[in-house]
Image (cartoon, rainbow, N blue to C red):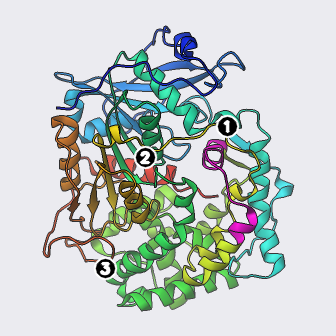
Amino acid sequence: MLTVALVLGGTPSGAHAEDDPFDRYNQQQLTWGPCPFTPEEGALPSECALVTVPRDWAAPDSGVDLQVAISRVRAAGERLGVVLFNPGGPGGQGTSLPGAIGALQPALSERYDLIGMDPRGTGQEGGTAPFDCAVPTDRLSQRTDLDARDRSADSIAEHLKYPRAVAEACQSDALTPYITTWQTAYDMELIRQLLAEPALNYVGYSYGTWLGAKYASLFPASAGKIVLDSSVNWQGRLQADFEAWPPINQRMFDDSFLPWTSRQFPDLVGTIPADAGKMWERVRTFFAEQGILAPDTYDAVFVGMGSELRWVVGALILTLGAAELQGTEPTPPAGLRTLFDEQSTAAFGVPVAGLTTDIVAAALRADDYTHVSGTRYAVACGDQPTKSARWYQRLSDRQGPEYPLYGWAYGLSEPCGFWSDAPKQELPSLPAEVAGRVLVVQGELDPQTGYEEARAAVRAAPGVTMVAVDDSPFHGQYTISGNPCVDGMVNVFLLRNSRPGNSVCPGVPLLGETEVFPVAGPVTTRAGAQLLAAQALPELRESVADRIAAANGDLR
């Protein structure tokens, strides 16, 4: 049986224990009421409240207080405690997440109050706008044909305009120094106190694994059961996860996505992955020559495809281009036709039959690069010391030849290379006393948080265990992947206090398929192991998966 002592949490650096900053804020009363967001169809009803927090936990008397939105889905039965959910980002809003998770995991919502949170800087879901950095238009490249494979001095200079402008715009905002993981971890501890809970159980996805691990490191006696799903290396550098995107995206693209397209669309892309790869290159060249899509824009479609719906968008654009090259129609197989029509309509406004390259180009060019997530860069670049722009350019030179999908572009697009502000607080590593309460869940081919990053964190924290998911190319496993093996292991931990040891779950079939096609990689499972994805509330599950992938996929 896990037991956790009740404490009031740590003391910010520079403060004295007798001047506990929580004392100024933990007497407020939570006023629960209707939430401003519209719940997704099938989600459980939520109630919301606002929590007042200091702008700076290190100096609570300085600056104007902030407000953080939280939500709650009350336990339907005999209550065990609370579980706080975080969708990641940095910058993801999470107040609507408990209602969706509760509907998809009724056993969990039976025993726990499920708590959501819109972390500082993210505004209030359905209400207050998030913190954005306003980037002057004249600071951005005006070219519409950028291709990071072009290594000329002019091309590199044009690419570097965006990250430099973003870094300067974000650092000029007075709020930026106070949007960090350290500050948010203190907000979480205040929430625990206001809920009068002896322990804060936690499920975090992607960046949420970093946040959860740092909360447990700063407040080890307050941390309950901690589930870190699709994990960064929370014992190392947060930025290293983004630096790993070129190799992990290339692996997923080559070993999972292209083979899948050759099975699903053999008449358009070819019957083997190598031919599908050649067709992908032909479409890239065709779109560039016709002025339809810049090569960088085309490449970006296939980067960070951490959800099934992102796969559909990638497949739509690839097959649309292949069909134009061959003078045919991009007709999806019967088993995928409904899903493709739904996603084509959601993304581009028309079903597959009405989709044209002009429509796709107009939608992709509509991205507003003058307003970017301030929270994303304040956290990613402000939590720890950064590398220089020159370091990132050299990284691009190294990664490009080996990982051409994103290796050329990433090192030329990283705003942290131009970040000059030093971190205000140091984030500790996970202490040994907490390791026995932490479970990591990780997909083998995750294109947004690499398997190697998760494994490195577990190896650097003896006592933490990991459930690996063989052959899974998606981002986010618990609840949203529909994998009964994963859901069962996490629920046993949360509901019965029995944490799994290091384990491997088989993957589930990809879209339109009824069997798993094994991929050679760092994870292996027993021969012949097969699972079918859970079928309950499939649209809600896919919607949550897409939201989590999107929250953790914005590198521009």
Which label lies toward us, 1 or 2?
1
Q: Name the residue under label 1.
A: 424
Task: Tell me what residue is drawn at x 18 percent, y 36 percent.
Answer: 497
Q: Where is residue 469 in the image (x, y as percent from the top left)?
A: 27, 62
Q: Name the residue under label 2.
A: 209
Q: Mark 3 points at which residue?
A: 520
Q: Give the range drawn in magenta.
A: 374-393
Task: Tell me what residue is drawn at x 36 percent, y 28 percent.
Answer: 221
Query: Relative to residue 294, is residue 3 depicted above or below?
Result: above
Left or right placement of residue 24 versus residue 262 in this view: right
Is residue 171 among what the camera can see?
A: yes
What amino acid is at disc 2?
A: Thr
Q: Give the CA separation, mark 3 to mark 2.
A: 26 Å
- The tag earlier along the polypeptide, 3 or 1, is 1
Q: Give the CA separation, mark 3 to mark 1.
A: 43 Å
- The tag earlier along the polypeptide, 1 or 2, is 2
Main secondary structure of the magenta stretch: helix
What amino acid is at disc 3?
A: Ala
